[in-house]
Image: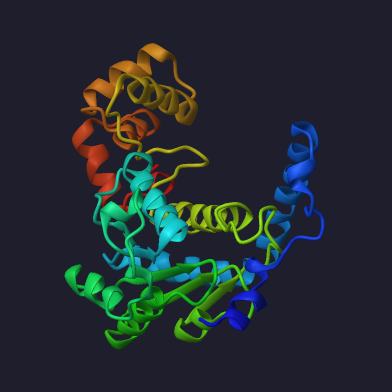
Amino acid sequence: MDLNELTNLTTEKRNQQTMNLDSLTIHEAAILMNNEDQKVGLAVAEALPAIENAIAKTTASLQSGGRIIYMGAGTSGRLGVLDAAECVPTFGVSPDTVIGLIAGGNKAMIHAVEGAEDSLTLGPNDLKNLNLTKNDTVVGIAASGRTPYVIGGLDYAKSVHAATVSLALNTDALISQHADTAIEVNVGAEFLTGSTRLKSGTAQKMVLNMISTISMIGVGKVYKNLMVDVQPTNEKLVERAKHIIMEATDCSFEVAEQTFIAASQNVKVAIVMILTGVDRNESEEKLRQANGFINKSV
């Protein structure tokens, strides 16, 4: 990317509201930064039609046994890895269901890997290593909208007929031309010029939250507004699981605890047991026939 291309990007422009950051008090800087951050939600709202299309694709992938695969470089890649990692405890899915790829591999989570994001071949190679199929959806994330690592990955994904989504923080982004569904969020110039971990990163996190959460709702991982597939992997989550059972069934703590144990610590099974009055085996069968949806099991 040459200098003219770089300076024409919204994410690289200087913010006229923050030209004197180095002479502000802490209070003034905090107010100004907070004012800028409040623009992010409104910018994401303008991109909702494209976000909805993307969620339809990712939901369809999960329904067909496919995966959601995020890929990006730098902050964009880290946010994809973060969202993917958080799906495991939140929704009880395997680490292979939502995957985050970052240019340069795991070490790039902490240290920049020189040249990785500029490669058109690393992205396809990473996807080949995952045995990408037509049932998967690849979400390419790039604040600039021009990252070669992402472009290469999206092009490869198309070649195997996987669904493709791009997420850029600039309009008329190059990666938009390489995806079936293009999400473009314009948050304006950054508080600190070119620091796309700020408003751009916040917008990316918001969009990824929507993609993963609403997709999981679409495959039965949520009952009402409760995380019914949460994995009780520590003491806090065990207690949360019992509370979820109480909220879902309006039962006492004692009933929730006893049924949770009887259900081998499976929250969904316990809820169906209480709501329908059946034993664990029949509850599991009801859920199996309903593809994991509690509201279709009771």
How was this image coloured? Answer: rainbow
Q: Residue at x 33, y 39 (%)?
A: 89
Question: How far across and down, in percent of the image, does residue 14 sit?
Answer: 72, 63
Q: Is residue 157 above or below residue 204?
A: below
- The residue closer to the viewer here, 181 or 39, is 39
Q: Residue at x 50, y 81 (%)?
A: 1
Q: How many marks?
A: 0
Question: How far across and down, in percent of the image, does residue 97 sit?
Answer: 28, 57
Q: Is residue 285 above or below residue 117?
A: above
- The residue closer to the viewer here, 107 or 138, is 107
Q: Residue furthest front?
A: 23
Question: How far across and down, in percent of the image, does residue 212 sit?
Answer: 44, 55
Q: Is residue 215 visible?
A: no
Q: Is residue 235 visible?
A: yes
Q: Residue at x 79, y 39 (%)?
A: 24
Q: Residue furthest top?
A: 254
Q: Is residue 123 above or below residue 101?
A: below
